[in-house]
């Protein structure tokens, strides 16, 4: 290799590394401040076609106690409907001919097998060729997805024996609200937000996202784990249970209904600050309930790039709990 060629390659590599470094720094700062660096309209909008199916149409009459959803691109909404004894599935901008569904070993699986163009390390590959979408896309390994594509699961009284729900979503948002499950609910999203409201679980609840925020309110469970690699976590705790909240590049904000003294609390951050109420404590904080206090559970919250805050909702002049 000629000396001049080596110089050009080395210079190009240095410029690429410098650009990647600056992109990463800007990305982390944007994530901490809840600012998206990606286009909100990466895909053109299409005519939205909506269809509704009784759940029995998709199960062939077979019984099931577990629900598994795999959605490559699009949103997932699971909620409870009142006044009906028949659960339904509503799809928007989804071709059911390419949407796999069936029951096996007591598990109803709904799988999005529709081929969809993807982005890998900033390069888009389609049948028409390929292109580079910018250095920032190296930090975003999938396209934002089509916001029109949505799967709605409406749970009625015939789902009273539902034991477990598992949701895997590639690019899209997941909303779960107003229902009861006997054992567990697990949600994982690569690129998108997770919103949880008023669900009751006999066992554990877990939610994770690579790029997106997680919000949880008014829910009951025995154990809860929320994790976001690049995003914020917000939780409002109203009952008993053990909680673990972990954000790599983002803030963790926790509100509790009951006095803070009733919880075992461990909070820490690497580069941010820990707050109890509006009081800045430092980079770590630990509290144990008094021996004569009945503990409402554990709260473990950590952030690497970001802050961690806990407070009692409605408390106007909060003070640290030592």
Image: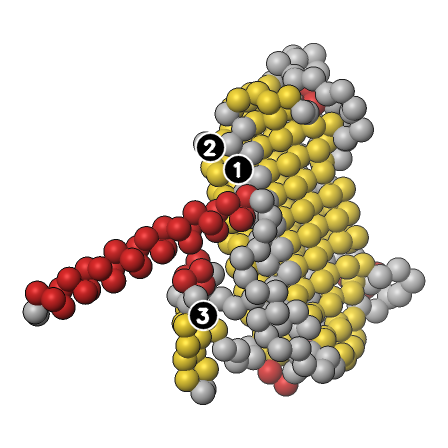
Name the residue: 53% across, 37% down: 306
Mark 3: which secondary structure? loop
Distance of label 1 from label 2 (alpha carbons)? 7 Å
Distance of label 2 from label 3 (alpha carbons)? 31 Å
Name the residue: 63% across, 85% down: 97
24 displayed left or right of 146? left
Quadrant of res 233:
top right
Q: Is 227 rendered above or below residue 4?
A: above
Label 2, residues with CA under 10 Å away: few <14, some 14-19, many ≥20: few
Q: Residue furthest front?
A: 4
39 displayed left or right of 317? left
Q: Residue furthest left?
A: 2
* Residue of label 3: 133
Mark 1: which secondary structure? loop
Residue 154 in the image: x percent, y percent? 78, 65
111 displayed left or right of 119? right
Label 3, residues with CA under 10 Å away: few <14, some 14-19, many ≥20: some
Q: Is 258 rendered above or below residue 19?
A: above
Label 1 or label 3, whichever comes before in sequence order: 3
């Amino acid at each position: 290799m000629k000396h001049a060629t080596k110089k050009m390659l080395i210079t190009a590599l240095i410029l690429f590394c410098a650009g990647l470094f600056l992109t990463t720094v800007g990305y982390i700062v944007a994530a901490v401040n809840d600012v998206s660096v990606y286009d909100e309209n990466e895909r053109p909008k299409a005519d939205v076609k909506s269809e509704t199916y009784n759940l029995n149409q998709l199960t062939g009459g077979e019984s099931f106690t577990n629900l598994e959803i795999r959605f490559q691109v699009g949103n997932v909404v699971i909620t409870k409907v009142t006044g009906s004894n028949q659960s339904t599935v509503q799809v928007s901008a989804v071709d059911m001919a390419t949407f796999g569904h069936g029951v096996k070993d007591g598990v109803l699986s709904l799988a999005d097998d529709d081929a969809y163009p993807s982005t890998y390390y900033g390069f888009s590959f389609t049948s028409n060729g390929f292109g580079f979408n910018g250095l920032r896309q190296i930090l975003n390994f999938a396209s934002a997805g089509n916001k029109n594509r949505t799967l709605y699961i409406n749970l009625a009284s015939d789902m009273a024996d539902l034991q477990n729900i598992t949701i895997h979503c590639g690019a899209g948002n997941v909303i779960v609200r107003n229902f009861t499950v006997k054992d567990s609910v697990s949600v994982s999203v690569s690129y998108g937000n997770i919103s949880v409201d008023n669900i009751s679980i006999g066992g554990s609840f877990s939610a994770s996202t690579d790029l997106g925020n997680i919000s949880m309110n008014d829910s009951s469970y025995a154990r809860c784990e929320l994790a976001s690699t690049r995003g914020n976590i917000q939780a409002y705790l109203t009952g008993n249970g053990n909680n673990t909240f972990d954000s790599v590049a983002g803030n963790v904000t926790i509100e509790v209904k009951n006095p803070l003294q009733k919880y075992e609390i461990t909070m820490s951050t690497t580069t941010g600050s820990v707050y109890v109420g509006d009081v800045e404590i430092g980079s770590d904080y630990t509290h144990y309930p008094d021996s004569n206090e009945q503990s409402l559970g554990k709260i473990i919250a950590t952030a690497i790039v970001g802050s961690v805050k806990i407070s009692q909702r409605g408390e106007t002049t909060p003070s640290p709990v030592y």
